[in-house]
Image: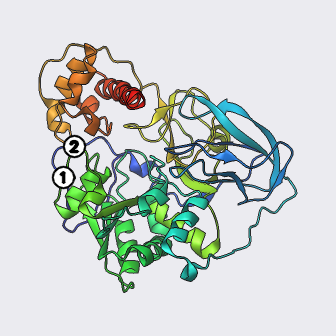
Amino acid sequence: MSSTTTYKGKTYTFNHGVHPEEFKTLSSHCEVQRMPFVDEYTLPLGQHIGAPSKALVNKGDKVKRGQKIADAGGFVSVALHSPVDGTVSDIGIFDNPNGQVLPAIKIKTDPYSTQRVEDLPIDIENLDTKEFISAVQDAGIVGLGGAAFPTHVKFAIPEGKKCKYIMLNGCECEPFLTADHRVMVESPEEIIDGIIILNKYLNAEKAYIGIEANKPDAIEALKKVAATSSFPIEVMALQVKYPQGAEKMMITAILGEEVPSGKLPLDLGVLVGNVGTFKALAEYFRKGKPLVERVVTVTGTAIKNPANVLVPIGTPMRDVIELCGGITDDAARILLGGPMMGAVQKSLDVPVVKGTSGILILTNNEVRDLEEYNCIRCGKCVDACPIFLNPSMMGMLAKKGLWDEMLEYNVMDCFECASCSFVCPSAIPLVQSFRVAKGFLREKAAREKETN
């Protein structure tokens, strides 16, 4: 099931990491198809890192496709827009893909609407930097690689810092997922245009686009368009290795520099964003289209017709699966995202949200409960960790509840890629224990801050 073609030129990478089976060929050849509009959409107010959006509509209100229905709830927050012409049918608490029940707006689709939206470009020439940042926030744009971090926050360069390089992440290193791949192949002009739009305000020296070598068609498509730009844009082929798409790993692979512990890419003068995010940026400023839909890979050995689908935000997962022929009889597990960092779902009725990069359905043969054994100190997790932590030691501390001691081993630097869990022969759920520890330590720090 691995990809059959790879880029033949020089490739770059980082140290450590793992090599899970790719499974890209299930959907990498599938051109993006548009999801038909469904009867009703559920739009959670908290689809991104930071404060949830604040509803601007009431039950019974008529809304238009692209209309803002919720305002940003703070600086680290974004607006939310209706994916369809329709009527607000409910505002309440509903199931969310993260396993919680959260406030959301339900919209009943107008069955007689054409759902067409007129292009209304934003006059970018007359926006200053502050107005540009505000416009990106108002567009509802977040990182589309999965983290869903509000994009305008990254673009707001703090005083005293400078963005030297714009870096686009086209790695898509998670097995199975191919949404970014298809966006790069089918929309290279919009991605490059997004870079040009942003650089009007950043005045960076250069842009890089990092793409894993198992996407040679995407590499060539972006190289061709980048060559027409007066602003220097270099497309770089990276080795196929997980987690090559983690921003710190990509920076190391491309620039040969390491982001120090506790620091951010911008401390090295680098701003990193997903390729799909830059496409969304271009669509907003050139057409006035806010983030109301995204490309989602629907894949796995238990889905009948794998596909890459342009899905309106808020579409029930059940409807997207039905579009792809439904699941097979031996389907055992559904995840939103990839197998390494994706979230297992208990219901088919949760909506696609801005951070949904994929819907993955696995079979009984691929999903099994492993018996956990004691750590045998083999060191495989240490060899796998891309940021040179000691997962074995942190795992033993976590098992004893010694959360504070884990800080000495830099547990907060862990970005939960799960490489350690993947290679552990004792089936110890290392990354899960680190996640619990980090949650406890963050809560403790917040309590201490309030006390002081």
Is disc 1 placed on a helix, strand or loop? loop
242 up-or-down from 10: above or below: above
Seen in the image, is 310 located left or right of residue 404? right
Viewed as shown, does residue 400 lie left or right of 256? Answer: right
Name the residue nearer the viewer: 255 or 327. Answer: 255
Q: Which residue is rendered at x = 19% and y = 38% of the image?
A: 384
Q: Is residue 311 above or below residue 11?
A: above
What residue type is disc 2 on?
Answer: Gly
Q: Residue at x 53, y 33 (%)?
A: 98
Res 29 visible? no
Which residue is labeled 1 in the image? 14
Residue at left 73%, top 59%?
67
From where the camera sits, is residue 267 visible? yes
* Residues packed near mark 2 inside 10 Å, few (<14), some (14 to 19) or many (20 plus): many
Say which quarter of the image contains residue 209: bottom left
- Dots 1, 2 in contact, CB < 8 A: yes
Report the residue at 12% width, 21% height from top: 377
| Residue assigned mark 2 | 17
Question: Which of the 4 image quarters holds residue 136?
Answer: bottom right
